[in-house]
């Protein structure tokens, strides 16, 4: 079992790239446990853990790691990573707003896990190898990242734009899921008239 939210620098490898990969392993393990679990309470707990892990990871990447490597890695890769974070944060905000309820909750978490796995693969196959080329003190960068994680765990996460968007609609803007619940099947809408039945 992985040590989730470990921020103890005395026992941790502080290389920034290794820390990001460890985060990736942690969250993939949570996704795997969620997929295997049939216990609703356990699944909700796994979702909460995964969302916290993802929020910590996104915060240190966006605030510390991405700015440090952006110029070298290149605009296209970094812009794509930014957009993948945006999509993940929208799903995270919707999952937190739903608080484990709703018939789309598990489906939404599954979609989040699929998107995050894709993001991890791109980071590990493309971004991180390019970042490694930089002449940079990755241990010092990692120490900053761990310190920021500790601060976030102690003081809480600042509100992000995606949370504000979801809060404004209380997930009522979640149109595909909402439309699926409201929409009547096509055959239920058009009942044949009595005269049509006689013909």
Image: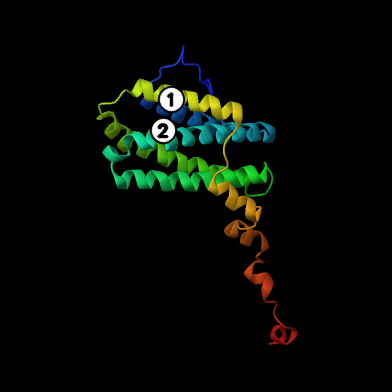
Asked whether residue 35 appears in the rendered view, the answer is: no
Image quarter (top left, top right, bottom left or bottom right) of the C terminus: bottom right
Report which residue position mark 1 lands on: 144
Viewer-side residue, 107 vs 93: 93
82 over 54 or under it: above or below: below
Q: Position of residue 123 (x, y in %)?
A: 36, 37
Vertical side of 170 occupied by 14: above or below: above
Distance, label 2 to label 1, CA atoms, is 8 Å
Which quarter of the picture shows residue 41? top right
| Camera-side residue of 54 and 150 | 150
Query: Label 1 neighbourhood size at 10 Å, few (<14), some (14-19), many (20+)?
Result: some
Q: Give neighbour class at mark 2: few <14, some 14-19, many 20+ (Cα, 10 Å).
A: some
Question: Which is nearer the N-term, disc 2 or disc 1?
Answer: 2
User: At x 50% / y 44%, what residue is drawn?
Assistant: 88
Labels 2 and 1 touching (C-beta < 8 A): yes
In this rendering, would 172 be left or right of 60? Answer: right
SS at circle 1: helix
Say which residue appears at 69% left-offset and 45% top-offset: 101
Label 2: element kind: helix
Q: Position of residue 194 (x, y in %)?
A: 75, 84
Instruction: Decide which of 161, 43 is in the foreground and name it.
Output: 161
- Give me the residue at 47% from left, 37% from top: 58
Which of the pair 100/76 is nearer the observer? 76
Residue bearing the label numbered 2: 64
Q: Is residue 90 visible?
A: yes
In the image, farthest residue toward the right: 194
Q: Is residue 19 left or right of residue 171?
A: left
């Amino acid at each position: 079992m992985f040590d989730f939210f470990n921020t103890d620098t005395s026992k941790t490898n502080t290389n920034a790239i290794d820390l990001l990969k460890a985060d990736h392993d942690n969250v993939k393990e949570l996704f795997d446990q969620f997929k295997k679990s049939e216990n609703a309470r356990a699944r909700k707990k796994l979702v909460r853990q995964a969302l916290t892990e993802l929020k910590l990871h996104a915060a240190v990447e966006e605030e510390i790691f991405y700015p440090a490597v952006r110029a070298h890695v290149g605009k296209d890769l970094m812009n794509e990573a930014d957009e993948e974070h945006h999509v993940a944060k929208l799903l995270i905000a919707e999952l937190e707003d739903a608080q484990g309820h709703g018939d789309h909750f598990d489906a939404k978490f599954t979609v989040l896990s699929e998107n995050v796995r894709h993001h991890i693969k791109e980071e590990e196959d493309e971004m991180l190898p390019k970042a490694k080329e930089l002449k940079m003190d990755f241990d010092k960068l990692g120490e900053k990242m761990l310190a920021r994680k500790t601060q976030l765990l102690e003081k809480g996460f600042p509100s992000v734009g995606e949370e504000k968007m979801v809060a404004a609609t209380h997930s009522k803007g979640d149109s595909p899921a909402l439309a699926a619940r409201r929409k009547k099947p096509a055959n239920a809408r058009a009942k044949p008239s009595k005269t049509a039945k006689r013909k």
